[in-house]
Amino acid sequence: MYQAMGKNMPQNRDLPHDRHKDKILRELDCAVIEYMHAGILYKTQTETQTKGFSDSKIFDSTRGVFTEGGPVFAGAGILEKSHIQVCIRNPNCIKGFFLPRKEVQFPAFLN
């Protein structure tokens, strides 16, 4: 599709200061995921129009695991910046939200 539009494919890129070269700017990954979701939506809408129903399911949310950074200690399988990201695609899944409160000094709070 990018070639047909005369555009270059997005690329995952490193941040200049990232010593681990984790490709933190994930523009290609994002484009692939959005393409997949657009294809599923198109298929669902087309089948619904032609057959009155679709067996395809539109995703309300997605979750990704990102393993980034170096080991937290020698031989560790835990990395410094590993994390999970959640993307809510259907805003109806959000039933509420909270306003963050002021941060406390946790060790003092425990006493």
Image: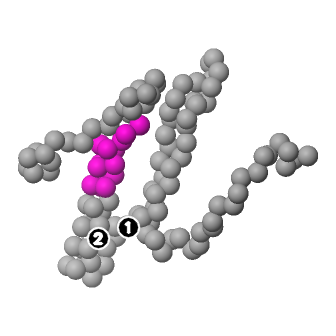
Query: x and y percent of residue 63 in the render?
Result: 48, 52
Examine the rendered structure and indicate whether residue 50 appears above or below residue 31: below
Which element carries disc 1, helix, strand or loop?
A: loop
Q: Front-most of 104 and 67?
A: 104
Which residue is denoted by mark 2 in the rendering? 44
Outermost residue, bottom side: 52
- Residue at screen point 27% across, 38% down: 11
Outermost residue, top side: 74
What is the basis of the colouring in this image? one colour
Q: Is residue 54 left or right of residue 89?
A: left
The 10 Å Cα crowd at callout 1, few under 14, some 14 to 19, many 20 or more, is: few
Q: Is residue 76 left or right of residue 40?
A: right
- Residue at screen point 85% across, 45% down: 108
- Residue at screen point 50% across, 50% down: 85
Which residue is denoted by mark 1 in the rendering? 57
* Mark 1 → mark 2, Cα distance in angstroms: 7 Å
Return the mark for residue 43: none
Q: What kind of residue is marked 1?
A: Lys
> Is residue 19 rendered magenta in the image?
no
Examine the rendered structure and indicate whether residue 49 appears above or below residue 18: below
